[in-house]
Amino acid sequence: MKVLFVCTGNICRSPTAHGVLRDLVREAGLEYSVAVDSAGTHDFHVGESPDRRAQAHAARRGYDLSQLKARQVGPADFRQFDLILAMDRGHLLRLERDCPPEEHHKLRLFTDYVEGRTGDDVPDPYYGGSEGFERALDMIESGARGLLGEIQRRHR
């Protein structure tokens, strides 16, 4: 199974989700069955590492994002990935617009996996302070655990 997380510039929310799910998948022993990646709807930060604040908050919880590099979603992603998760409704709309109709079934909102937050956006912490990164990370950890549970059910 191949999972792609998508946010605006691929430097805060989506690489954090990428790092969190990657570690959970590894801990569950599914690293050979599940591939994880992230991308942005825009090319603002292509080639850059995740935001230093996102990296610092993730590192405090044991997640290493330092090797990730921002990239933009491309046409091949819609064919290559089994599940494409938008971090907010704006990203989902953009993905729906760009995605070939036959691949639309792969598009979902990430918070569909966050208990009690279905349909919500993961708030963008970029312009806020420390509490924004912590709030986003809380939602991302919850959603990644929910997603991992679904993946494990599929692999039984």
Image: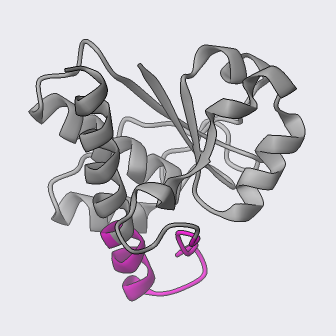
Instruction: Please give the count of numbered marks on the rendered protein.
Output: 0
Image check: 83 left or right of 79? Answer: left
Q: Residue at x 54, y 23 (%)?
A: 82
- Residue 100 in view of the camera: no
Q: Is residue 24 above or below residue 116?
A: above
Q: Quadrant of residue 115?
A: bottom left
What percent of the width, then of the height, locates residue 76? 73, 16
Q: Quadrant of residue 57?
A: bottom left
Q: Quadrant of the N terminus?
A: top left
Q: Residue at x 29, y 60 (%)?
A: 141
What percent of the width, then of the height, locates residue 21? 31, 42
Image check: 18 left or right of 107? Answer: left
What percent of the width, then of the height, locates residue 26? 17, 29
Magenta stretch, residue numbers: 120-138
Residue 105 in the magenta stretch? The answer is no
Q: Residue furthest right?
A: 97
Q: Is residue 115 above or below residue 147?
A: below
Q: Is 85 in front, or is 52?
A: 85
Q: Quadrant of the C terminus?
A: top left
Image check: 3 left or right of 79? Answer: left
What percent of the width, then of the height, locates residue 53? 40, 68
Q: Residue at x 64, y 35 (%)?
A: 71
